Amino acid sequence: MKALLIGMILAAASFAADVSGVWNGTFSYKQQDGSTGEPRQAFLELKQDGEKLTGKVGQSADQSFEINEGAIKDDLVTLTAAMPEGSLKITLKVKDGKLEGDLLMERGDEKRKATLKFSK
């Protein structure tokens, strides 16, 4: 019975996509009028260990922040990173070999939302 339970847990863990590697893409801030700003370069480096994710996120490898907390469950990736005087909260979905989702940047009283799109 114990071996069956362990086998089921390992099988369930294997269904999560492997998102390890370097991802490049874009982020676009949402403007106050509801429109989306011009896309800017985005960078994501992930190392996956089961459901735990570590790595960096930013505009490039040289301009990036360490991921404080990262996780993947099924096709949902959640990340947080500290930046000078603020934080980043990211939620991404794995879809067709790409990562797409939202970013919330908080710095003091300022909060900005952006859409993210990454591919390998």
Image (spheres, rainbow, N blue to C red):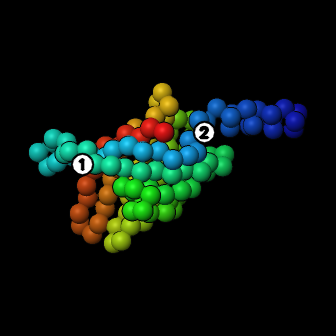
For residue 18, the mark is 2
Residue visible at 47% across and 30% down in the picture: 95
How far apart in space, not on screen, are marks 2 and 1 (Cα)? 27 Å
Q: Nearest the camera: 54 or 21? A: 21
Indicate the position of residue 114 as horizontal and vertical percent values.
29, 47
Amino acid type, label 1: Tyr
Residue 60 occupies which quadrant of the picture? bottom left
Q: Is residue 19 found left or right of 85 in the rendered image?
A: right
Q: Nearest the camera: 84 or 89? A: 84
Amino acid type, label 2: Asp
Q: Is residue 88 above or below residue 109?
A: above
Secondary structure under tag 2 reads loop
Residue 12 visible, this orientation: yes
In the orientation shown, which residue stands out farthest toward the bottom? 85
Q: In the rendered structure, which disc, 2 or 1, sits on the residue that comes first in sequence?
A: 2
Q: Nearest the camera: 118 or 50? A: 118
Residue visible at 84% across and 32% down in the picture: 4
Report crowding for label 2: few under 14, some 14 to 19, many 20 or more residues within 10 A (C-alpha).
some
For residue 29, the mark is 1
Secondary structure under tag 1 reads strand
Indicate the position of residue 56 as horizontal and vertical percent values.
49, 57
Residue visible at 46% across and 34% down in the picture: 98
Point out the image quarter for the N terminus: top right
Report crowding for label 1: few under 14, some 14 to 19, many 20 or more residues within 10 A (C-alpha).
many
Residue 58 occupies which quadrant of the picture? bottom left
Q: Nearest the camera: 43 or 12? A: 43
